[in-house]
Image (cartoon, rainbow, N blue to C red):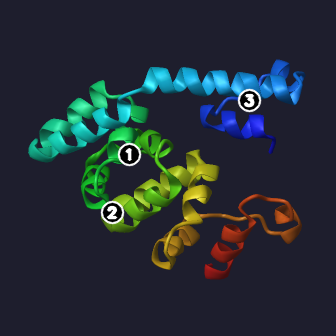
């Protein structure tokens, strides 16, 4: 992956063709400009996420959950979640509607998401894993690479993997897929 692709991968958008046509020095100038622009526009968000995570500790879940689902975008909810303790984040994860939690999870660090899944109630974690396998397989494989064996067995129970090893030769998730396959 080029430095430009790495710098822009957080957007989940394909790299514009026009950027690929530029010289590396020109690409770097654009990356620096984008970094400065993003920094300026997001200045203070970490502190806001931290403050919200502290405030919601004192508000009952039955009040926070409907407000969150109705008024807070998943990316923002993920930012707040990342400022919470794993136990606090898990409490919300268990109570959020599955589709909303799925959207939130795509904005959470894979390692943290694996920790949250490992602490979720078994039924909720299994529902989430099953949903992600159906709708966001690559995302779940990214998270699965950080899951403990107990949770990886849940994934193994629900996933259907390619039959031939030839299908996995250059697959970016080959290691976790092989581990899951051994558990089946």
Nearest to viewer (mark 3 / mark 1)? 3
Q: Quadrant of the N terminus?
A: top right
Secondary structure under the numbered disc 2 in the rendered image: loop
Q: Residues within 10 Å of mark 2 (few under 14, many from 20)?
A: many
Residue 144: image quadrant is bottom right
Name the residue carrying label 1: 98
What residue is drawn where x is 23% and y is 38%? Answer: 51
Q: With 2 as the anchor, is 111 left or right in this view? A: left
In this rendering, the answer to whether 89 lies above or below 12 is below
Alpha carbon distance from label 1 to label 2:
13 Å
Q: Position of residue 61 (x, y in %)?
A: 16, 45
Q: Position of residue 43 (x, y in %)?
A: 41, 26
Q: Which mark is residue 14?
A: 3
Q: Is residue 133 left or right of residue 31?
A: left
| Residue assigned mark 2 | 120
Q: Position of residue 77 (x, y in %)?
A: 35, 37
Q: Determine whether the residue tagged by mark 3 lies in a helix, strand or loop.
A: loop
Give the Cα distance between marks 3 and 1.
27 Å
């Amino acid at each position: 992956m080029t430095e430009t692709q790495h710098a822009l991968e957080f957007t989940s958008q394909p790299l514009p063709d026009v950027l690929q046509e530029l010289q590396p020095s020109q690409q770097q100038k654009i990356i620096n400009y984008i970094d400065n622009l993003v920094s300026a526009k997001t200045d203070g968000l970490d502190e806001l996420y931290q403050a919200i995570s502290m405030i919601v500790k004192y508000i009952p879940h039955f009040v926070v959950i409907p407000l969150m689902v109705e008024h807070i975008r998943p990316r923002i909810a993920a930012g707040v979640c990342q400022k919470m303790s794993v136990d606090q984040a898990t409490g919300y994860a268990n109570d959020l509607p599955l589709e909303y939690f799925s959207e939130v999870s795509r904005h959470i660090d894979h390692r943290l998401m694996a920790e949250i899944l490992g602490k979720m109630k078994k039924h909720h974690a299994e529902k989430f894993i099953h949903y992600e396998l159906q709708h966001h397989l690559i995302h779940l494989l990214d998270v699965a690479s950080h899951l403990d064996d107990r949770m990886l067995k849940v994934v193994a129970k629900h996933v259907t993997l390619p039959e031939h090893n030839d299908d996995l030769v250059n697959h970016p998730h080959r290691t976790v897929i092989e581990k899951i396959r051994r558990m089946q």
